[in-house]
Amino acid sequence: MKEDQKSDYAQFEPADANGINNNTDGSTSTEKIEEIKKWLTDEYNLISWLDESPQASAETTPISEKAEDRGETVEEIIASYEAEIARLKDEICEAKEGQAVIFDENREEIRQKVEKLTEENTKLAKELKEASEQLAFLKERLEEALAGLPVDHAEIIRKELELKEKERALEERERRLTEKEAMLENKKAGAAVEETALEDRYHAELLEKESDYRRREQELRTKIEQLEDELKQKNIEIKLLKDELEIAKMSAPDAKKEIEKTIKEIQQKEKSLLLKDEEIRRLREELQEKNEELQKIKSMISYKEEELIRREEDILYREKLLAEERRRFEEAKKNATSIEEHEMVKGLEDLKAEIQRKEEELRAKEKYLNAKMEELRLREQGIIEDEIAAREEQRALEMQQAKVKTGNPRLDDLLLGGIPFGSNVLVHGPPFIGKEVMVNQFIAEGLKKGIPAIWVITDKTPNDIREEMKFVVSGYEEYERLGLVKYVDSYSRSMGDTTVDPYTVYIEEPTDHDKIMNAVEKIAKEYKDKYEYYRLAFRTISTFIAYSDINSAFRFLSPFCGRRKRDKSVSLYVVEKGMHSEQEIQMLGSIMDGMIDFKVDQLRTYFAVIGICEVQSRAYIRYTASKSGLTIGSFALEHIR
């Protein structure tokens, strides 16, 4: 055996045999390892060792983690030798226990097997040495190649190679552990209580090591991703530096031409963006046309429904006539002759046939109208889903700017882009001035982009909200069916309304603040799991305070607003002017991020933005309101024009 191979085997220390499982104590395991080492280094005779220790345990043990790190070939050699030695020991033990004598031919056979194993050991050691030399040569070539690369690139490549080597080592260890588990399963049939305990301990160690390996593998993958990100960033920086270097190397005319070329490319990209904007505008116009067509179809359906109602009334009238005819017939039956009775019966049968025919016609028309209504509903749902998908870029832009649109472009311009995420805003003003319309526009704008909404209502029913929203956004019921609208209603039950709405959480008592808080939290959690944020409208705080008092309302609203800010939602709270003192308004304002204040002056309506964020003007701005929205005047130079 070669000297370098002997030295390699001699490096396996007994202290490193922590992975060996044996039924004997630690000293016996150490002695067995020492004997195997001596035999591998030609310092011990295998046959004499077998003869001297026939009662030794036949259990073989796996190599330690340090031996595993030396490579796959060495580990396979040791494992195969241990298995063969165990088998031979079994034969010797069985022969001596049964007072049997090993014949010369059996000894010769064992010696031949030992010689064969020794030859294989020598051959594998030679292959190991050649592979090591080839690996050293390849590493030298790799270092020479890396020396010609930039330092950052070379370091990244080295780290990637190290990571790949560690991954291979981890995979090999996992394979070894799998083989060990298979060996233990094969021995389960004849295992006793002690073997079961050892197997349980082995499985515990296996699970612990697998967990450690997976953790290390995850760390390596994370590091690889970080290195890949750094590599991409370095590539971008290198490209920019190359471009700058190329321009710097050029003469002044060439550099000017290159800059002009770059400017032309930028202009082409701007032109492409303008074309896309034009295409978006055209699609919006088409969507508007489809909405108008849908409104026409809805009006037609309404007309058909009215006609159906009229026909039903006609049928009821005819049924009354039939009942009257029957009564007259019964009265005349006593005095009439048989001929008259026959004519009346015939007329009655004709009238029944006519009524039945009319009823069948009405049922057929009703069925047709229901089918058309379902078809229109499906078409409307498809249009809404297409619109939500088309506004993906607008949602992304809101997330990028950290501001949400209000649904009124002029108000968005005043707010320099919209209301910031996590804002709680009071909408303060007298009744019937349009503040509710602003809130409705705000909710509708979110629904069009697929952003869910929560209504907390204290003075309206869900049906009242639906009727208002029909003037602001078409297909509001479809948004409800898509799961984008939820109501927390503390008004209906207090008014004695027992209607059950599938999209509403009913609060029995308007003063039950805990149930209102829990209902909103539950809905908010569902929305946060699916969407980026949500919008909330509270209508109204004034009614909420009227049921309790300002201190209770303040204790409720303070954590309520804090949780909405935590969820990064945008919430509007309606407050009626004239119902509260200036001190109460100041208390409410202390937990808000700002206020939109409405007022009437000489039969003209104005509003002003107080707080919230940076705006173009803090002055009162004139506007007009309708059921569908607000029309806002000029707010340039802090003056009303």
Image (spheres, grey):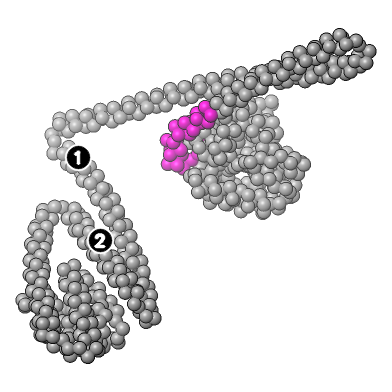
Whole-Å distance between the Cαs marked 2 and 1?
38 Å
Q: As shown in the figure, which amino acid type bears the numbered disc 2?
A: Glu
Q: Quadrant of the N terminus?
A: bottom left
**Circle 2 residue:** 167
What element does badge 1 sit on?
Answer: helix
Q: Position of residue 96 (x, y in %)?
A: 22, 89
**Pointers 2 and 1 in contact (C-beta within 8 Å):** no
Foreground: 602 or 21? 21
**Does residue 380 show up magenta in the picture?**
yes
Range of residues picked out in magenta: 378-406
**Circle 1 residue:** 243
Q: As shown in the figure, which amino acid type bears the numbered disc 1?
A: Asp
Identify which residue is drawn at 23% across, 61% down.
Answer: 168
**Left or right side of 501 for 408:** left
Q: Position of residue 545 (x, y in %)?
A: 72, 46
Q: For the residues carrying marks 2 and 1, which lies nearer the camera in this image? A: 2
Q: Magenta region's main secondary structure? A: helix
Identify which residue is drawn at 35% across, 74% down.
Answer: 189
